Amino acid sequence: MGFKENLKSELLYKGVLVKELAARSGISNHTINNYLSTSNCIPTAENAVKIARVLDVSVEYLITGEAAKPSRPALNPDIRIVTDTMKRLDGADQKMILNLALAMKEKQEAKNQPVCLHASV
């Protein structure tokens, strides 16, 4: 993925609107919208640093998508949202969701197991 896709992903993950990013970074809405809509539109180093600071990621991550923050593995936005939401739940709700996920995993694994038919004698 390129800058455009990585920026879109981070905005979605962080729940930051373009106008918020513009206000916090000092970069115009128009310029940020160009980054989001134009292929191969790479920001200046100065703008990349401003955006990265607001989104709390490295410039390298925004450009290449390969250098996530060490404290957080690179996950797709949906999985990151689920993970972050789960962290905010109380222990009982976390346990309930964990049990549901484990049950779903077992069901999926059972589907993928070969069926062994035994001939009755």
Image: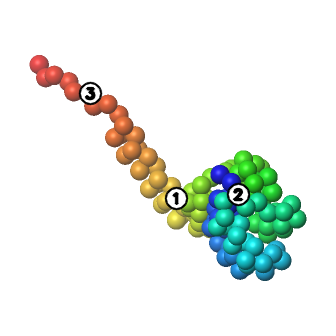
Select label 3 or label 2 by which is in front: 2
- Above or below, comparing residue 110 to residue 38 in the picture: above
Quadrant of res 6: bottom right
Residue, x 46% and y 49% (percent of image)? 102
Q: Position of residue 3 (x, y in %)?
A: 71, 58
Residue, x 68% and y 54% (percent of image)? 2
Count neighbours of disc 1 (C-alpha within 10 A) and say few if under 14, some if 14 to 19, many if 20 or more.
few
Quadrant of res 119: top left
Select label 1 or label 3 by which is in front: 3
Quadrant containing the C terminus in the rendered view: top left
Q: Position of residue 20 (x, y in %)?
A: 73, 79
- In terms of depth relative to the viewer, which is nearer, 117 or 7? 7
**With 8 as the anchor, is 68 left or right in this view?**
right
Give the SS element for disc 3. Answer: loop
The residue indicated by pointer 3 is 116
Select label 1 or label 2 by which is in front: 2
Residue type highlighted by circle 2: Asn
Count neighbours of disc 3 (C-alpha within 10 A) and say few if under 14, some if 14 to 19, many if 20 or more.
few
Count neighbours of disc 2 (C-alpha within 10 A) and say few if under 14, some if 14 to 19, many if 20 or more.
few
Extreme residue in the top direction: 121
- Work out how far the residue at label 1 is from the one at label 2, CA to CA, in angstroms: 44 Å
The residue indicated by pointer 2 is 40
- Work out how far the residue at label 3 is from the one at label 2, CA to CA, in angstroms: 53 Å
- In terms of depth relative to the viewer, which is nearer, 73 or 102? 73
